Amino acid sequence: MRNTWHVELETAKRRLGSFQEQLGELQGAVALEQERVALLTRLLELSPEGTAAAAGSQPPRAAASPPARLARPSLEDAVVAILSESPEPMHVSDIRQRLVSNGIRIPGKGNDANVISRIIRDDRIERAKGRRGFYGVRR
């Protein structure tokens, strides 16, 4: 019976990890769409066509030129900013959650391994000695 509970526990842990990964991906997608809605709303508020459309006239068929894309910080820059705010090294899962909540896109599947593969190449970030999965800003 004891082995059955161990198997059940491992199965539950794997499922939980999978759900957490899916949740992280969905939170990232939601954050990106919220940002897109906010930016498009702001763009419409700033443009004369948007003001006219809000007043009830027909919206323009095509814009003269696409809006300039707002620069986003790189994943590495965002991680450095997150780690700089923390007095102690942070676990990669906590870093990933903060990235997702800040609307930073994580390449690949958006999991912890994708974050690690990017941050270990950055000279500003180091792995905490003796603490697996923990990273901090190199001081």
Image (cartoon, rainbow, N blue to C red):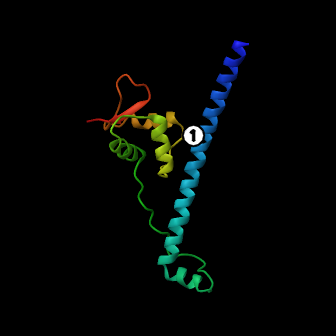
Residue ID for mark 1? 109
Question: At which x and y percent is residue 128?
Answer: 35, 28
Residue that appears at 57% across and 58% down? 33
Residue found 34% across the figure and 24% down from its top: 129
Instruction: Name the residue nearer the viewer: 114 or 11.
Output: 11
Left or right for 27, reference 129: right
Question: Which of the pair 127/122 is nearer the observer?
Answer: 127
Image location of residue 91, percent across then percent down = 44, 33
| Quadrant showing the N terminus | top right
Residue in the image at 62% along x and 86% along y? 56
Q: What element carries label 1?
A: loop
Q: In which quarter of the image is residue 53?
A: bottom right
Query: Percent from the top left, x then y, of residue 113?
Result: 50, 33
Relative height, residue 11 to residue 70 (above, below): above
Q: Closest to the observer: 111 or 71? A: 111
19 vs 88, left or right, is right
In percent of width and height, residue 14 lies at: 64, 28
Q: Residue sitting at 62 percent across and 41 percent down?
A: 22
Residue type at mark 1 is Lys
**In the displayed structure image, the side of residue 61 where residue 88 appears, left or right:** left
**Quadrant of the image for the C terminus?**
top left
Q: Classify 42 as above or below 134.
A: below
Q: Is residue 53 above or below residue 74?
A: below
* Rendered view: 92 above or below 1: below
